Amino acid sequence: MDSKSSTLNVDGTSVEMSIKRGTIGPSVIDISKLYGQTGMFTYDPGFTSTASCESKITYIDGDEGVLLYRGYPIEQLAEHGDFLETCYLLLYGELPTAAQKADFDYRVTRHTMVHDQMNRFFQGFRRDAHPMAIMVACVGALSAFYHDSTDISDPHQRMVASMRMIAKMPTLAAMAYKYSIGQPFIYPKNDLDYTSNFLRMCFAVPAEEYRVNPVLSRALDRIFILHADHEQNASTSTVRLAGSSGANPFACIAAGVACLWGPAHGGANEAALKMLEEIGTPDRIPEFIGRAKDKNDPFRLMGFGHRVYKNYDPRARIMQHTTHEVLSELGIRDDPLLDVAMELEQIALKDEYFIEKKLYPNIDFYSGITLKAMGFPTSMFTVLFALARTVGWIAQWSEMIEDPSQRIGRPRQLYTGAPRRDYLTVAQRG
Ligand code: SDX
């Protein structure tokens, strides 16, 4: 019979702590009373053994390589559904009926335009500004344009802000891309589906009609599904912590964008492609594998390894399939980067170091090859990740705001600095 509590002996004091069980996955020991009863904190830098919250949205089994959105396997959602259906599922907890899906699509579509003065906001950036720098700024600036949906205590305003962000991220992302290449912004068109609209805003020019390739649109829509949510990863935890202070939703999502930018997180897709380009040819792979294993070399195989997945990232498998589908549709018979990536994967997965440390390709390993083939510059890869992850951030933020036990997140520390000491005047400092 599973125990309902655990006892911790601290300096002769026995502390009983309840054990909470989830639907599936690891149970948790509730340590919330530990400090009050022992005067001690737990210590877990990087939160490798810490559950920060209770959630019903996404479940990951890292050992089995399982990813569920509201209980549905990512493989099934990616195969049968579209991104806005996944958005509805993550936000509301159930797959939509036909009528619910039509209404949701209609509502998102009619929020895709941004306040026209944002165009002037863009003019302040250098043309060579990194698109992620622009996204951090513009997403945060949405709260300066949409004051009527910043009151987090009002469920209607929370819903409007959520719709606005899901709808406007593609428009802002496309604007960031267009601005970086000196082309005019393309307005959204309401008769296009979400991802086709985004592709057109990125690649159409006023000088001629643009026909969206349905195979590429479907592939990118599937890539968005793969990136939509992922439990309490670094950027989602950032959004939750920012939201716990009562900050407005646009500011919270901007914080998530900023955190995602790091190369250890969402920035890995950009870093992985740059790594594949640096390797260049399969004969150089052993040199880089050696560097990745060298403790004295900070180099890591970008797109490999994961805090949770100690098996193949299920998203990476679907991503690899999508890569082949896109390259085939574009008539790219042999992509040297794909050759390097597949050879690198084969060699790494047979290498004792990677086997022992359970390092497998993650979602970022193949995504860059696909996005580059579609015509996106490397600097846009993490922007696309942020576009897709916005719905996950919002769903997790909403779950936190609606949790009656929610309070401001405020971790403590182990202090190892100077003990109390008195001020010395300059003359006393020697
Ligand atoms: C994402 O959390 C999420 O869910 C994130 C994400 C999401 O959808 O939100 O899945 C998206 O961020 C995917 C991960 C993208 N990042 C990368 O591909 C960057 C390369 N990977 C690593 O930096 C690393 O694997 C992390 C950051 C992903 C995970 O780091 P951990 O869990 O802190 O693991 P670690 O750094 O402690 O590594 C454990 C060991 C170490 O060796 P030892 O110190 O034990 O000897 O494995 C080694 C590491 O040196 N290691 C690697 C490696 N990743 C880990 N060695 C070589 N190459 C790598 N890629």
Image: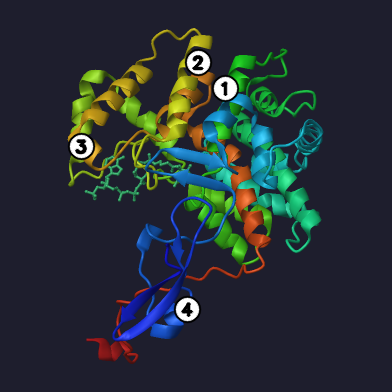
In the displayed structure, 305 sits above or below 407; it is above
| Dot placed on the residue nearer the N-terminal end, 3 or 1 | 1
Dot 2 crowding, Cα within 10 Å, few <14, some 14–19, many 20+:
some
Quarter holding the C terminus? bottom left
What's the residue at 75%, 23% (across, down)?
192
At label 2, the amino acid type is Glu
Residue 161, position as x, y percentages in the image = 74, 50
Between the C-alphas of marks 4 and 1, the distance is 48 Å
Comparing labels 4 and 1, the label whose residue is closer to the camera:
4
At label 4, the amino acid type is Lys
Q: Which residue is mark 2?
A: 325
What's the residue at 78%, 30% (across, down)?
98
| Dot placed on the residue nearer the N-terminal end, 3 or 2 | 3
Comparing labels 3 and 4, the label whose residue is closer to the camera:
4
Q: Please give the label number shown on residue 33.
A: 4
Residue 290, position as x, y percentages in the image = 18, 34
Between the C-alphas of marks 3 and 4, the distance is 45 Å
Q: Are marks 2 and 4 in contact (CB under 8 Å)?
A: no
At mark 1, the secondary structure is: helix
* Left or right of residue 215, residue 43 in this image: left
Q: Are marks 1 and 2 in contact (CB under 8 Å)?
A: yes
At label 1, the amino acid type is Ala
At mark 4, the secondary structure is: loop
Question: For this rendering, which residue is in front, 100 or 346?
Answer: 100
Between the C-alphas of marks 3 and 2, the distance is 32 Å
Dividing the image into four quarters, tell me where ligand 1 lies: top left
Comparing labels 3 and 1, the label whose residue is closer to the camera:
1
Q: Which residue is mark 1?
A: 219
At label 3, the amino acid type is Arg
| Dot placed on the residue nearer the N-terminal end, 3 or 4 | 4
Q: Which residue is mark 3?
A: 291
Dot 1 crowding, Cα within 10 Å, few <14, some 14–19, many 20+:
many
